[in-house]
Amino acid sequence: NQPQGAMYAFPSITLPPKAIAAAKDAGKVPDTFYALALLEATGIVVVPGSGFGQKEGTWHFRTTFLPPESEMTDVVDRMTAFHADFMGKYA
């Protein structure tokens, strides 16, 4: 069956203290800092989880799976590479 709607996911992300400090220095909430970095590096848009009332001290983002199925592997690979680079920079 063809999907009849969007699919949302709210992955949690563990951000290292250096990333949290960099977000604070930039005047951003840590998950917003992460989401903006993802957008700038990959063009992939996610919504910071802090806008959805997440538990204090935890970080998430919301994503909607909209790309055609044939592009999903590329999108996931780009997100994975970004996350590895981000963690390497701030770990």
Image (cartoon, rainbow, N blue to C red):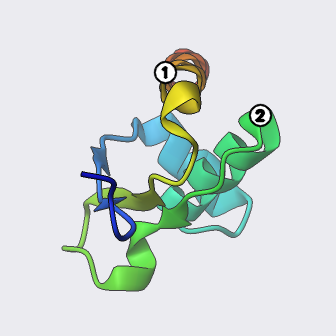
Farthest residue to the left: give it: 55
Q: Is mark 1 in CB contact (under 8 Å) with mark 2?
A: no
Given residues 54 and 56, the one toward you in this image is 54
Q: Position of residue 38 (x, y in %)?
A: 66, 42
Given residues 76 and 19, the one toward you in this image is 76
User: Three-letter amino acid code at disc 2?
Assistant: Ala
Q: Position of residue 43 (x, y in %)?
A: 77, 43
Which of the two marks, 1 or 2, is nearer to us in this view? 1
At a point 33% along the width and 54% down the height, the residue shown is 2
The residue carrying pointer 2 sits among few (fewer than 14), some (14 to 19) or many (20 or more) residues within 10 Å by Cα, namely few
At a point 56% along the width and 16% down the height, the residue shown is 81
The residue carrying pointer 1 sits among few (fewer than 14), some (14 to 19) or many (20 or more) residues within 10 Å by Cα, namely few
**For mark 2, what is the residue?**
41
Which labelled disc corresponds to residue 64? none
At a point 45% along the width and 52% down the height, the residue shown is 65
Q: Position of residue 5 (x, y in %)?
A: 36, 70
**For mark 1, what is the residue?**
73
Q: Secondary structure at mark 2?
A: helix
